[in-house]
Image (tube, rainbow, N blue to C red):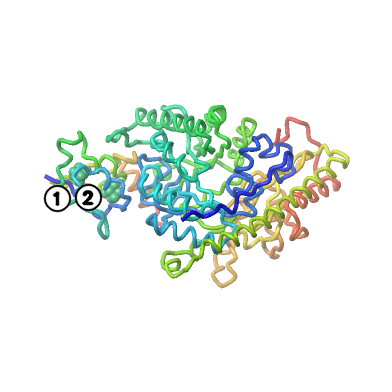
Amino acid sequence: MALKIIESCVNCYACEPLCPSDAIYEAKPHFLIDAKKCSECDGDYTDPQCASICPIEGAILDALNVPLNPPGSLTGIPPEKMAEAMAELQSH
Amino acid sequence: MELPVLNETSQSEGGCSAGSCGSTDDQLSHLSDDIRDKVQNHPCYSEDAHHYFARMHVAVAPACNIQCHYCNRKYDCANESRPGVVSELLSPEQAVKKTMAVAANIPQMTVLGIAGPGDPLANPERTFATFQALSEQAPDIKLCVSTNGLALPAAVEELSKHNIDHVTITINTLDAEIGAKIYPWVFWNNRRIKGKKGAQILIDQQQKGLEMLVEKGILVKVNSVMIPGVNDKHLAEVSKVVKAKGAFLHNVMPLIAEAEHGTFYGVMGQRGPSNDELQTLQDECSGDMNMMRHCRQCRADAVGMLGEDRGDEFTLDKIEDMEIDYQAAMEKRKVIHQAIEAEMNEKRAASEQSQQQALAAPKLNTRPVLMAVATSGQNVINMHFGHAKEFLVYEASPDGVRFISHRKTELYCSGDDTCGDAETALQRNIRTLEGCEVVLCSKIGYEPWEQLEQAGIQPNGEHAMENIEDAVMAVYREMAENGKLEESNDDQRISA
Ligand code: SF4
Ligand code: SF4
């Protein structure tokens, strides 16, 4: 079992030094998790470290491709509010 | 290699401090000589020096350990940069090279700060590697660092080992209830902690860090973001507490929130304070402590003086090819710094003299007036109205002239045919001058002149190249003589 980082990652480096398994590495265009090394922090921490500091909703997925930090969970912005604001901006 | 420190000169004679504005409460005069020495030539702390010296920031610290509601982590930290900005991330080695390249080319650059793009202390290795190298290789550069405070207590010991003489902490509240409305989460002891509990941890760490720094003799500046309806009523209390604990400056900045930045406050329609609200709060807090009104929220990779940004001249590929003989540069810098200091001292003396004269003249009993000034530094009126990227706002009153704030503008005249949108940008700029009755500049076009007059703001180009405070006072006296200023009763006064 392993987590993965997808393209919405903003390359902030926050997760990399926290990983107990040395599974995270800098790559282009964004950071990646080595699936062979990732332990999901099992045995080291209660919460997966990368997903506990990552500031970007949806950037880290579990083995079933479910985001650990779904939309609205970190910023507190209700997803429908965000969609509304973005639609508003697009119309200008 | 051990390099001698060439720039340790700093004069501090009682009475001759950096309060350049002929103001009644001389900005730095209440500070001890020791502290005044440290801040006198610091462009971020001394209102006087920021006309002459420059600072730069390097973006070496990408990670952050908290979330603020005015920040979108797709961009740089919004505590230290304006929102919506992305800086070029540097490795510590690149940052050191860039700093030395800038210092060699812009001798006025005296301060290097690390402020982001995340939280410097959430990236201790990158931040301290940069400081370590600069302390060794460029000892004539002052170092500073800004932080949200969460990791501060753990970093104080390390900070005290480097050439760091001041730390900025952003403190928006002392109350976890309010904190939960500003900080959705913090990362602490390997967990993401949300809500009031997270906010309380942050508040405790900030206060502890502040106390530890003061104990170590490291200068502490406190920044606060004014968020109407959230912490605006509470910031006067914050000011009082941090001062009691030994912070030497408190800087209240306005919240900047736009939907397009994608921040919580932007999307949820939280407004920022008006110029008026900001000034009222700054006045309220200045009774308690020295305020840093001239702060301009520069970018995490800003280079330059007075709102200018010369970062483009020092991009990675450009510095790559630069050969820098820092020993030679340091000699040159020393000579230039001494000349600037001499000039500053001369101007301070002259300004004291003109204040004395002003005091000798019959005392006015007129109401205070706000005036905007277009300047690119040197403390003189030397900017064309249409070229000003920002205006400095001063208050003139019978007690003298004091600096109030910066107001940023959009350039409406770029000198080529991109002026299509001129009308609206000019109108917007005039709106940023709301509350001012006069605008002083070196030159101004016919159109803006007319529109300013229509908006009730008197343009004035008669004092080009004159000292700002003297010119503002001269215009004020002229207004008084022409009967434009009704007498004031004391409770109507803006200043205390
Ligand atoms: S879940 Fe844990 S082990 Fe896996 S990449 Fe993230 S931090 Fe490393
Ligand atoms: S913390 Fe998130 S955004 Fe930052 S580098 Fe890791 S995955 Fe990317």
Tag of residue B166? none
Give the residue displayed 47% in from the left and 68% down from the top.
B323
Q: Nearer the viewer, residue B289 or B140?
A: B140
Which quadrant: the C terminus of chain B? top right
Q: Quadrant of residue B15?
A: top right
> Please, is residue B308 above or below residue B416 in the view?
above
Q: Residue furthest bottom?
A: B417
Residue type at the position of mark 2: Ile
For the residue labelled by badge 2, is the local secondary structure a helix, a strand or a loop?
strand
Label 2 lies in ligand 1 vicinity (Cβ under 8 Å): yes
Q: Nearer the viewer, residue B395 or A87?
A: B395
The chain to which mark 1 is attached is A
Q: Nearer the viewer, residue A51 or B304?
A: B304
Is residue A67 shown to the viewer in this render?
Answer: no
Tag of residue A24? 2
The chain to which mark 2 is attached is A
Position of residue B441 in the picture relative to residue B226 (left or right): right
For the residue labelled by badge 1, is the local secondary structure a helix, a strand or a loop?
loop
> Please, is residue B178 above or below residue B351 in the view?
above
- Disc 1 crowd, CA 10 A, few/some/many (<14, 14-19, 20+): some
Give how far across and how far down residue B144 sits, in percent.
Answer: 50, 46
Give how far across and how far down residue B347 sits, in percent.
Answer: 74, 52
Mark closer to the chain start, 1 or 2: 2
Q: Are marks 1 and 2 in contact (CB under 8 Å)?
A: no
> Please, is residue B90 above or below residue B175 in the view?
below
Give the residue displayed 43% in from the left and 39% down from the top.
B148
Give how far across and how far down residue B131 sits, in percent.
Answer: 44, 49
Residue type at the position of mark 1: Ala
Q: Residue furthest front?
A: B2
Residue behind mark 1: A35
Give the residue displayed 61% in from the left and 38% down from the top.
B35
Give how far across and how far down residue B389 sits, in percent.
Answer: 59, 58
